[in-house]
Image (tube, grey):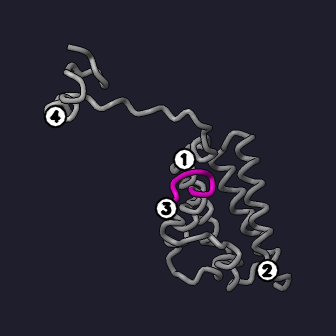
Amino acid sequence: MKVISWGCVGQGAALRSSPLFHAGCEPPPPRRHDGPVSFYDEIGGEETITRIVARFYAGVAGDEVLRPMYPEEDLGPAEERFRLFLMQYWGGPTTYSERRGHPRLRMRHAPYPVDPTARDHWLRHFRDALDEVALPPEQDQQFWDYVTHAAQFMVNTMES
């Protein structure tokens, strides 16, 4: 007898095609992912992004400038969309695009008057969220650079 793949004892291809082969053998160990680690994974994945988004929306809920921009009484659906978007953006699951298609952020925000005051309120709540989560400085800066750029990109009016 010779040892074949997965550490099972048997007689080559004939045994590998047998149901008995699969019933008594352990599957191969999961392959190690040797590629680069995503930013999503570096910062703690879904748990960290969920905490950031929850803290952000806690701020939005009481904000006199931002809260009126959300047509839904319950901020839960908006929070879920934002969480899924950030997870995907930073290298996590692609659930956002699978459910909603391309993000088209500027188009999705076009119905709402986003002026510099709204941008600054949005950024203040995001800064509070990042501070609460306390990412390592390099990751904090990378996240902050992205959101400040994205917030500026969403500005669609100079009128308050």
Q: Earlier in the sequence, mark 1 or mark 2?
A: 1
Which residue type carries mark 2?
Answer: Asn
Tell us which disc is closer to us: 2 or 4. 4
| Contact, mark 1 vs mark 4 (Cβ under 8 Å) | no
What is the span of residues highlighted in magenta in the rendered image? 88-95
User: Which amino acid lies under the numbered mark 3 shown in the image of this protein?
Assistant: Thr
Residue 101, relative to residue 143: is it above or below?
below
The image position of residue 36, as x and y in percent, is: 62, 38
In this view, the mark in front (4 or 3): 4
Question: Which numbered circle lies on residue 95?
Answer: 3
Give the spatial CA distance, label 3 vs label 1.
14 Å
Name of the residue lying farthest toward the right: 158
Give residue 156's mark: 2
Q: Please, what secondary structure does the residue beneath circle 1 have? A: helix
Q: Residue at x 80, y 68 (%)?
A: 152
Alpha-carbon span between mark 2 and mark 4:
65 Å
Q: Secondary structure at mark 3?
A: helix
